[in-house]
Image (cartoon, rainbow, N blue to C red):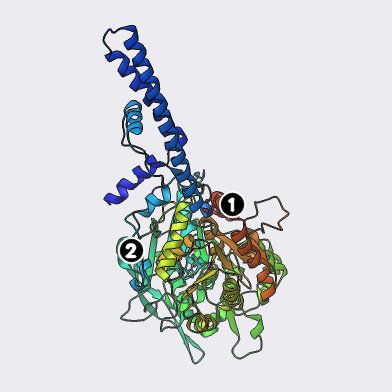
């Protein structure tokens, strides 16, 4: 901590431009020497005075000559330091300031002392870094320094939110929440939106399964709130049987957001047990159907009357179905509770966000019994029947369809993806559901934001060095840190291309594989961080052709810390998705001054505009874009990006500064404003 406390001061002093400080002190020094000499002289003869004047003149000339030499040396050192950081944009290279003293004293010291070597800000930051080596293994798991330098936050930092005139009570129901229950963008969105709404003065709670893998010590104020019996049925031989599952509720805070954690008594059930968020040894449809019911039961039993229940993805799609339509006949038979949740929460409206139409939550009618309600009720075309299964035995339900039909408003995560689902093939067969008149009017695309507090290169505790649009020196240090840690060639001039992604077909795996070859051909470096079932081709490259290549590194794992370090270190982030509802990685990359190279689809097309080809004037071009799904199309963007990096470092540095400075555009505060408008709209229904 000592290091951390001292370094900011050093850096702040050192950042004073040389032209404003050192020359001022130097100009004062000779005058003072002259004044002191005159005051000390006793009465003397004219000749003695003339001789003294001559001597003073000669000494002044010598002083001036020495001063000129010193300035020349200083100038050379400054030029050398600037050249060393030409890839870092407007480098601020300054002299180390003398210890605090009055101008006069400092001037005298400057005149007397030998010329100090120029010290760049980067060199000063560098002193605090514990450099990694490949032998260290998971170098990203240790904090690279005690604390980042507190640089001035870029636009879009937290704290700028305006408060809305009317506070809305929102309960999110979700399978993921960043950072501790995050698998992909869903987790980021829930936490980012919740934090932004809290900052705007709204009352927000997040209901989440209490997964066994959630780290208890990361949940503030964790406490057990209550147990209750949650209705949970099963269908056996076509006969619905009701039952209960003892359910535990815990409350606490994650990232400052109030959370309500739900889990079954693990003596009775193994739902949500295991070391991962998804893929435990239980039936996921059953788990999330039970969770949906348990959330509603909790809201009812705790007497809550939220204005809005905001559900996410197929996992929470049964919530609107049950909220509006849990039928009286089952409650009469088995429970005392009133039939419909909507009668208990008459003011409440349900908003649903679909983050990806790729997973639509198919389930058999008998599986739906896990909600305590027979799936038969929803098995009609106008409700949740999966139309593709009509005539099959058994016919199936589609939870996403049920959620769309029963919610008061439905959003997806970017305007362009909304358009692709309505007019293209992005929603698959659900396109016809979206087109029904009742749905079309309540469906829209709201562009996701990013949590500009969590993703902040000026304060990111995962980084070896922080940086900002105005002080970019730290980015080059982050690059060197990653190159050293991963055992790559340490070279500031090689363009470093990164992929941080789930490795599933949606993400354009064949193009990622091609990009590895192409980048190496063009003299660059390639880093992959990812997990997913479609990773075999990349694993083959990593273990075969590129095994000993010092310019290629792949890590098939999930690591928040390493992701932050890669975003900061890379020069370009590649996102060649086949489809991308919104995509967060390109926005995070922009925030870190890492230029995105993306395929023009879904939210990628909304957020990245090609620096060479964009004609519009709604935003500044900020990356490289291609259209097709073949290698040649990818080359058309990647080649241009690499050529620009190598051939035009000044322009590249300017682009990097611009995209970072423009980062406020991606803040959740902007997106939260759209959601608050939507909440108010559904509340007026
Ligand atoms: P998706 O939701 O389809 O996975 P997004 O781009 O919307 O894609 O969000 C991906 C999020 O997951 C980003 O925050 C990204 O940094 C993170 N992420 C993806 N893969 C990894 C990984 N292997 N390790 C750490 N973070 C990852």
Q: Position of residue 176 (x, y in %)?
A: 45, 68
Quadrant the C terminus occupies:
bottom right
Residue at 39% x, 51% y is 123
Q: How many angstroms separate mark 1 from mark 2 (CA)?
A: 43 Å
**Which mark identifies residue 218?**
2
Dot 2: what SS? helix
> Dot 2 surroundings within 10 Å: few (below 14), some, or many (20 or more)?
some
Beta carbon of the mark 2 residue lies under 8 A of ligand 1: no
User: Which numbered mark, 1 or 2, is in the foreground of this view?
Assistant: 1
Q: Position of residue 638 (x, y in %)?
A: 63, 67
Q: Which residue is mark 1?
A: 650
In the picture shown, does residue 660 fall above or below 244? above
- Asked whether 663 or 130 is in front, the reply is 130
Q: Position of residue 400 (x, y in %)?
A: 58, 73
Dot 1: what SS? helix
Q: Position of residue 254 (x, y in %)?
A: 38, 60
> Dot 1 surroundings within 10 Å: few (below 14), some, or many (20 or more)?
some
Quadrant of residue 432 within the rendered picture: bottom right
Which is more N-terminal, label 2 or label 1? Answer: 2
In the image, farthest residue toward the front = 47
Residue at 59% x, 58% y is 447
- Asked whether 343 or 616 is in front, the reply is 616
Look at the numbered discs 1 and 2 and tell me whether their residues touch, using CB distance below 8 Å: no
Res. 179 in view = no
In the picture shown, does residue 256 fall above or below 579? above
Quadrant of residue 71 within the rendered picture: top left
**Which mark identifies residue 135?**
none
């Amino acid at each position: 901590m000592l290091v951390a406390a001292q370094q900011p001061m050093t850096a702040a002093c050192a950042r004073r431009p040389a032209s404003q400080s050192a020359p001022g002190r130097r100009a004062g020094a000779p005058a003072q020497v002259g004044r002191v000499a005159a005051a000390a002289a006793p009465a003397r003869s004219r000749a003695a005075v003339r001789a003294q004047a001559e001597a003073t003149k000669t000494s002044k000339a010598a002083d001036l000559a020495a001063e000129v030499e010193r300035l020349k040396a200083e100038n050379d050192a400054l030029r050398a330091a600037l050249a060393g950081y030409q890839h870092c944009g407007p480098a601020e290279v300054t002299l180390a300031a003398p210890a605090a003293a009055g101008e006069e004293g400092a001037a005298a010291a400057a005149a007397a002392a030998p010329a100090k070597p120029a010290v760049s800000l980067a060199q000063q930051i560098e002193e605090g870094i514990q450099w990694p080596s490949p032998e260290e293994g998971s170098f990203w798991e240790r904090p690279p320094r005690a604390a980042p330098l507190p640089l001035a936050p870029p636009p879009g930092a937290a704290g700028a939110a305006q408060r809305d005139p009317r506070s809305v009570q929102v309960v999110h129901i979700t399978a993921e929440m960043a950072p501790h229950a995050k698998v992909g963008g869903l987790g980021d969105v829930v936490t980012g939106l919740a934090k932004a709404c809290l900052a705007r003065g709204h009352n927000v709670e997040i209901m989440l399964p209490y997964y066994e893998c959630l780290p208890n010590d990361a949940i503030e104020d964790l406490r057990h709130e209550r147990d209750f019996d949650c209705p949970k049925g099963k269908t056996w031989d076509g006969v619905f049987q009701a039952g209960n599952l003892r359910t535990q509720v815990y409350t606490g805070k994650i990232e400052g957001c109030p959370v309500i954690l739900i889990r079954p008594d693990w003596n009775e059930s193994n739902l949500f047990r295991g070391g991962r968020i998804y893929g435990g040894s239980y039936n996921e449809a059953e788990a999330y159907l039970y969770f949906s019911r348990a959330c509603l039961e909790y809201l009812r039993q705790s007497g809550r009357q939220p204005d809005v229940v905001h559900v996410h993805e197929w996992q929470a799609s049964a919530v609107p179905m049950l909220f509006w339509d849990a039928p009286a006949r089952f409650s009469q038979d088995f429970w005392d509770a009133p039939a419909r949740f909507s009668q208990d929460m008459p003011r409440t409206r349900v908003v649903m966000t679909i983050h990806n139409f790729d997973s639509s939550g198919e389930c058999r009618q008998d599986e739906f019994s896990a909600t305590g309600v027979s799936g038969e009720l929803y098995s009609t075309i106008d409700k949740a029947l999966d139309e593709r299964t009509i005539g099959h035995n058994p016919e199936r339900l589609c939870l996403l369809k049920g959620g769309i039909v029963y919610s008061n408003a439905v959003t997806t995560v970017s305007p362009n993806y909304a358009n692709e689902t309505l007019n293209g093939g992005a929603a698959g067969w659900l396109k016809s559901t979206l087109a029904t008149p009742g749905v079309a009017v309540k469906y829209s695309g709201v562009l996701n934001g990013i949590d500009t507090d969590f993703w902040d290169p000026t304060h990111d505790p995962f980084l070896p060095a922080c940086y900002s649009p105005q002080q970019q020196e730290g980015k080059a240090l982050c690059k060197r840190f990653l190159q050293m840690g991963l055992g790559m060639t340490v070279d500031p001039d090689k363009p470093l291309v990164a992929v941080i992604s789930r490795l599933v077909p949606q993400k354009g795996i064949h193009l990622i594989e091609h990009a590895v070859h192409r980048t190496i051909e063009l003299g660059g470096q390639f880093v992959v961080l990812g997990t997913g079932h479609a990773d075999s081709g990349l694993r083959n490259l990593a273990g075969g052709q590129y095994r000993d290549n010092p310019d290629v590194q792949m890590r098939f794992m999930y690591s928040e810390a390493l992701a932050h370090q890669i975003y900061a270190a890379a020069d370009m982030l590649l996102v060649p998705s086949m489809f991308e509802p919104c995509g967060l990685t390109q926005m995070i990359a922009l925030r870190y001054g890492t230029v995105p190279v993306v395929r023009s689809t879904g939210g990628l097309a909304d957020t990245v505009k090609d620096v060479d080809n964009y004609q519009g004037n709604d935003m500044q071009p900020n990356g490289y874009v291609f259209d097709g799904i073949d290698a040649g199309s990818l080359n058309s963007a990647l080649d241009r990006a690499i050529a620009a990096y190598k051939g035009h470092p000044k322009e590249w540095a300017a682009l990097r500064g611009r995209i970072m400075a423009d980062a406020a555009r991606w803040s959740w505060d902007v997106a939260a404003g759209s959601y608050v408008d939507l909440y108010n709209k559904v509340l007026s229904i």
